[in-house]
Amino acid sequence: MTELLNTLYIQTPGTSLHLDGDTVRAFHPDDDADAKPRRVPLVRIDHLVAFGGVNVSQELQLRCAADGRSVTYLTSNGRFRMRTVGPATGNPLLRQAQHRAADDPAHRLAISVAMIAGKIHNSRQVLLRTARDSSGFRQTALRASAELIAGRLELLRTADSTGEVFGVEGITARDYFAALPHLVTQAKEWKVAGRSKRPPTDPVNCLLSFLYGMLRGAVHGALEQVGLDPYIGFLHGVRAGKPALALDLMEEFRPLLADRLAFTLLNRRELGIKDFDHLPNGAYQLTDDGRKKVFTAWQQSRQRTWPHAYLGREVEAALLPLVQARLLARHLRGELAAYQPWMVN
Amino acid sequence: MTPPAEGGSGIREVPLSALEHYAYCQRQTALIHVEQVWDESAETVRGDLSHTTVDLPGITRRAGVTVVRSLPVGSEQYGLRGVCDVVEFTGEVATPVEYKVGRYQPGGPAELQLGGQALCLIEAGFDVPLGHIYSVAERRRHPVTIDDALLQQVIEAAEAVRRILDSPTLPLARNDKRCRRCSLRDACLPEATDGRSRPLLELFAPRPLGTWRD
Ligand code: SF4
């Protein structure tokens, strides 16, 4: 069984990371000279994420590459900059199969439909669960949204192009985010209207964007680990520099792995308004402290398990992207009749 | 992990480690050597071992015995290639020692790998009457007699592995009790790949609220 390993996030600018035997050692010029050096054994880490201003020694990068660990570099706002991986892994036959599927409209359609069906299903679960735990108007509104979304599955059934699937996805996302004020209990405090992305103009959307970034990193890494090409997608069109397959595969994870976590953090007031900076252009950004809280919550949420309707067993959140990337690989290699999205039950 | 390659003789070379995987499960052989699934636990353990017990490549001599660590070996005739953890040379006699993390299993997969090393050393001109499997868990050596039966088994297994490496499809998953202890289980998904068809998900019917915990 793949051991559940941790991702090491380093965000304090000025920190440098070094290889020290079989450990990562963190150093910062402001460190107390007498304090114990901060070390993490490499065997406990599967992935290293360095935010802006963090320096990773070449020796450590080489060791990570040799062991099959990736190192991802993000800006301090969580934007992707680069990622280092070891020698290419995976089977060229798998990549060929992926490219053939991406060139075949019917095959693209079938895989896209499955992924979006998974997303719609999991979105409904978020709405239904929140409805169950609320009352009155809020409950009625959430149930109505869930109903609305259920109806979209019919459109998906009859979709005959990826364009149409994209359309269904768009409408469903709109319906779902229209319920945002009911999903976040203190919505009034935060003036949440719906989904706003570039830049996020309220804390809820800021948090969602941040968590999607984390999720995208996890999915991208899982695809690479399995030997799939993250840039050749089925639903999202292929465009230079756009990890289309990572975006495709992310869809089914968003509602439960990112949205639900965001709502929980806000509803339990584990994150407050002081964890966000309100910038002069109206945008919101997590403070260093806020980001730290989100990392901790994200890391904890990765340890829990979720039921998997197709496999009929529980799977750790951290392994879900890997398991789904593998189900996709198995399908493309002809071992599974259809791609089976992750559906919670 | 060493990917299979063409040897000088033109036949596809079989990594010695693949013999051991093959003895455990045919699909595992293909996952590691064709799909290049990275076996985290195995690789990590190997790394740990090389740092402590087996140490870096090197040669030591004592009282007529030359001990070589991390010795690359190969067989042109049978298309084998690999690295021996430790080989002790005394005159014309070579004794391979293979390090294993777990307990020794008589007749287990490790013996096949040891037999493969012996085959390579024999082709290099040495006598190999005996090998050892060192169990790190038990901290002791277990002698294994290298006889014709074992060597024959190795030759047949190498042929079978070559067929797996050349096939564009993977062998079916076993989905039996062996899978529970298998480190590749998450990569293999034996529940879904054992060739018995599971019902596929109904994608378009709304599903009732699940029992997932929060
Ligand atoms: S999980 Fe089972 S079938 Fe798959 S490689 Fe392991 S032992 Fe073989």
Image (spheres, grey):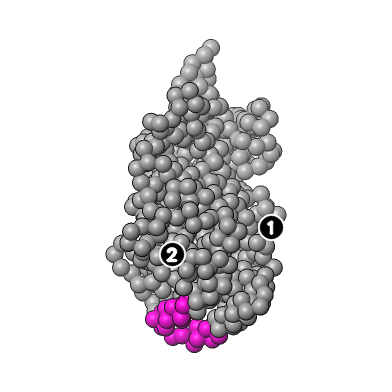
A146 sits left or right of A295 in the view: right
Out of A328 and B80, give the one closest to the viewer. Answer: A328
Image height check: is A274 above or below A283?
above
**Where on the picture, by quarter, is residue A10?**
top left
Report which residue position mark 2 lands on: A202
Out of B102 and B90, give the one closest to the viewer. Answer: B102
Residue located 37% across and 41% down the image: A13
Q: Which residues are magenta?
A: A151-174
Expressed as whole percent of the image width and height from the top left, the position of residue A46 reads: 50, 46
2 and 1 marks in contact (CB < 8 Å): no
Residue farthest to the left, as pictured: A240
Q: Secondary structure at mark 2?
A: loop
Expressed as whole percent of the image width and height from the top left, the position of residue B140 reads: 66, 27
Report which residue position mark 1 lands on: B176
Can residue A34 be spotted in the picture?
Answer: yes
Residue located 56% across and 80% down the image: A145
Number of the label disc, if any, that sits on residue A314: none
